[in-house]
Image (spheres, coloured by chain):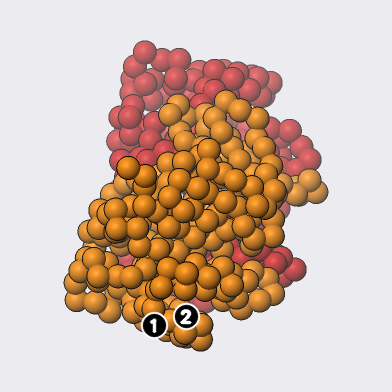
Chain colours: A orange, B red
Amino acid sequence: MAVRRNLLLLSNSTLHPSGYLEYAAEYICEFLRSRKVEEVLFVPYALRDQDGYAAKARSVFESWGFRLSSVHESENPALAVANAQAIFIGGGNTFQLLNNLYENKLIDVIRKRVLESGIPYIGSSAGTNVSTVSINTTNDMPIVFPPSFTALGLVPFNINPHFIDTDPNSTHKGETREERILQYHEIPGTPPVLALREGSILKVEGDKAMLIGKFHARLFVPGKKTEEFPTGHNFSFLL
Amino acid sequence: MAVRRNLLLLSNSTLHPSGYLEYAAEYICEFLRSRKVEEVLFVPYALRDQDGYAAKARSVFESWGFRLSSVHESENPALAVANAQAIFIGGGNTFQLLNNLYENKLIDVIRKRVLESGIPYIGSSAGTNVSTVSINTTNDMPIVFPPSFTALGLVPFNINPHFIDTDPNSTHKGETREERILQYHEIPGTPPVLALREGSILKVEGDKAMLIGKFHARLFVPGKKTEEFPTGHNFSFLL
Ligand SMILES: [Ca+2]
Ligand SMILES: [Ca+2]
């Protein structure tokens, strides 16, 4: 049986110099409308001001003609997920987000809704990190200690959002992003890492994965040479 | 009873454009010689190529007239720490480093040797992160999952090494370093964070802490305005 999976995985929420989610508006609207979604369940767990975060997301989704409810406003978050038409997990701190998903016991229920019922899932930044195998390739600061780095596993690889190329003129001696991902791959058994630059989106439908947005993406596979792939590229081989 | 603590905490190992540890050579040599140290125990756990890492550290310390043994060459790492005249923990990946310290059961034995026997401790980058309360303010990618983020606790605050100022011209939408530390401080009960730019060193002797090296440091205290302090500043109030 094919996996019933509908994912729109954004590298980032805001692309300079446009407003919140503006650069991705046409993709998000088409993704939701073509699936007859009228209301989106928002997960604001990556930030601490969840009321403020939900209000910001609500105003954008309402301006596009969708209703938005926030899981943090629900007495029973698992039930809210069970009844959701679609889920949007926003960015912020990935550790905080994953920790809150575990604390609210939402890992299994989200995975089931997305992989078995096939409800549309939109992730942005940290919300994209948690859709993958693990949060081992987040860029965030580990401000809270989650019970595990294992994430939703909606795809069998990891993503590095906000990927940034090495600046050849930098004198800073912290590891470059490329070095960090290569160090991750020194560990046996680690999955491929798809690095998405800001403005890039991965769209996954069942067993098809396609890069959309404006930019190339960089693929890291353990034991192989790192490769660049253009927008429009078919990444289904990763599934 | 005063704490018997002798720490030299480096923000980084290499300062552009000089060689490995070169910028800190005079501080390290004075720190060890004034304490009659002849041999240093090196902890190469932050990188995977521990043989190569130990060889690199050995050649530098030998060029200064010290012997260097590496804890990973010892059959009994805890015994090596118990017999060490001084400890140097090098940089790399902070998660890998802390995980290896836990796996080799070295947390308590290092803490005891440094805080009770007063043996000199040098940390660089990740080796500075693990000397503090926790690794919550590392910049590294979480490539391995340690059993805890709690670290050696040789000082009662956290450090952010490789601190980098916000570039006002950047269009990148990942969090700035400043934003990351402020998000950490939104969590109740978090300790102060001393942000050390590359080239800065904190020297701690008993209940005295002094900033040395070339640059200002930035102090984040929950609920207070972030402040800059010049090199030479007395940070003993943090102890
Ligand atoms: Ca983030
Ligand atoms: Ca590092």
Decide which of A84, B92 is in the foreground and name it.
A84
Looking at the image, residue A79 lies above or below residue B107: below
Percent position (x, y) of residue B13? 63, 38
Percent position (x, y) of residue B122? 52, 37
In what element is the residue under mark 2?
A: helix
- The residue at which mark 2 appears reads as A61
Decide if residue B76 is on the left or right side of residue A35: left
Q: CA distance from mark 2 to mark 1?
A: 7 Å
The residue at the point 31 percent across, 46 percent down is A148
Decide which of B78, A60 is in the foreground and name it.
A60
- The residue at which mark 1 appears reads as A67
Q: Are marks 2 and 1 in contact (CB under 8 Å)?
A: yes
In what element is the residue under mark 1?
A: strand
The residue at the point 29 percent across, 53 percent down is A116
Q: Amino acid at mark 1?
A: Arg
Subunit that carries the residue with mark 1: A
Decide which of A99, B199 is in the foreground and name it.
A99
The residue at the point 56 percent across, 40 percent down is A181
The residue at the point 51 percent across, 39 percent down is A238
Circle 1 crowding by C-alpha within 10 Å: few under 14, some 14–19, many from 20? some
Decide which of A10, B93 is in the foreground and name it.
A10
